[in-house]
Image: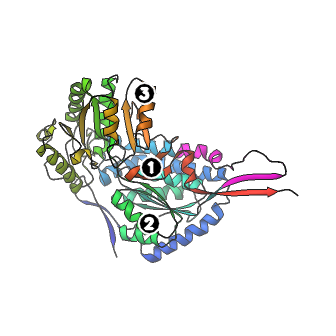
Amino acid sequence: MSKLVCTSPVDGTIYAERPLADDGAVAAAIARARAAQADWRDTPVAERARLCAAMTDAMAAMADDIVPELAWQMGRPVRYGAGELAGFEERARHMIAIAEEALAPVTPAPVDGFRRYVTREPLGLVLVVAPWNYPFLTAVNSVIPALLAGNAVLLKHAAQTPLVAERFQAAADRAALPLGLFQHLFLDHTGTARLVAGGAVDQVNFTGSVASGRAMEIAAGGTFAGLGLELGGKDPAYVRADANLDHAIENLADGAFFNSGQSCCGIERIYVDRRLFDDFVAGVAEIARGHVLNSPLDPATTLGPMVRPAAAQAVRDQIAAATAAGARALVDRASFARDDGAGAYLAPQVLIDIDHDMAVMREESFGPVVGVMPVSGDDQAVGLMNDSRYGLTAAIWTADMEAAAALGARLETGTVFMNRCDYLDPALAWTGVKETGRGATLSRIGFETLTRPKSFHLRQL
């Protein structure tokens, strides 16, 4: 029997193995889901919300066990592990709170002799394909809203985080969700593509790479299933001359290096007004040098390993190519004993004397490296921020909110931040442009991608 294998980035040992679901198991899961959804779709939203709240409570109760599991599976330091569970709760509870209003019928202006309204009908069966880097946060964006909207859910989680899928299942079971309404499946890429291509699911919400997103589109071709895709990113930040410099340094360093830079909305390139440039890069480099790179199981660790040695090597290659082309690295890797130049442990890095001909400023790094360029002002900054095939978030540091809003209107991105970054507000739509993806999750807009409108035009004779 084929197996899914999770190799821990902590020490390179096998942490978990699970058998892959065969075609028979997948077909049985689909049948159970369809049967459960037939009743669930007629369950009042308030009752759906009650059960989803119980599922959220059950997940929160497992936090102490989840935190070390996360460290072993994907390398995040235990000192930060609880933060993801807090974010899980924030997103789930917000969507639960707005569900009844967001899913209520839409009623246009009255017309004598007619009753007119639009209901939000569940799609049926939603497949959520979630990544390893924020395995609870990325999954909850779709799982809880899909259930609230009256759908059944199949969760296919990344091979690196199989225990997260099991935690979702345990939470659903402890909450006493109807049998079959929520299920997880262990699948490889081929099995996932076969499931999507089979036409058995009505919506696929996928988070992953651009290449995998294209493969998902090909698999779904001709099935008429909806696709929500959150793909790659190269999120920029701009520090204007009027910015609070200390705040910008602290927050952007965190946005660049937290989770070893493995964040879809992490900061990967920064543009700084020339008048602040020297002080800014000195401050960010100082923070980078102060990180403790070590085992994520050590409470003193602030930077754990990347997910696998190959991922760390890809970032090393970007840094090497940039420095060979004239970039200057401000952090001495040799001062980090755990970075041996070959494994998953990678020291943080700040690069200057760079340009957009370098891959480190154009291609997704997904690691603890950030390039910083000086700019002459707003127009140059906007041009450089838009010079990307990606567009998830963009952050502006300034004291002028009106200027931030005006600049944000010119940016090709899904979310504009002012004086913060690397954050997701569940009251706002989470979406991207260009090769970062399509569709939206969270907020009341997120419910629209998980339902279909049904219009009623009733005439009284």
- Expressed as whole percent of the image width and height from the top left, the position of residue 293 reads 21, 42
CA–CA distance in space, label 3 to label 1: 44 Å
Image: magenta residue range: 92-119
Identified by mark 2, the residue type is: Leu
The answer to whether any part of residue 188 appears in the image is no
**Of the image marks 1 and 2, the number of the one nearer the N terminus:** 1
Name the element at disc 1.
Answer: loop
Report the Cα–Cα distance between label 3 and label 2. 47 Å
Q: Nearer the viewer, residue 69 or 266?
A: 266
- Looking at the rendered structure, the kind of residue marked 1 is Met
Residue at the disc numbered 1: 62
Queried whether the magenta region covers residue 33, the answer comes back as no
Instruction: Give the image's coloring scheme.
Output: rainbow
Q: Earlier in the sequence, mark 3 or mark 2?
A: 2
Question: Percent x, y for residue 34?
Answer: 58, 68
Residue of label 3: 403
Kindly identify which residue carries mark 2.
185
Which residue is at the front of the view, 272 or 185? 272
Q: Is residue 383 above or below residue 163?
A: above
Alpha-carbon neighbours of circle 2 within 10 Å: few (<14), some, or many (≥20)? many
Q: Nearer the viewer, mark 1 or mark 2?
A: 2
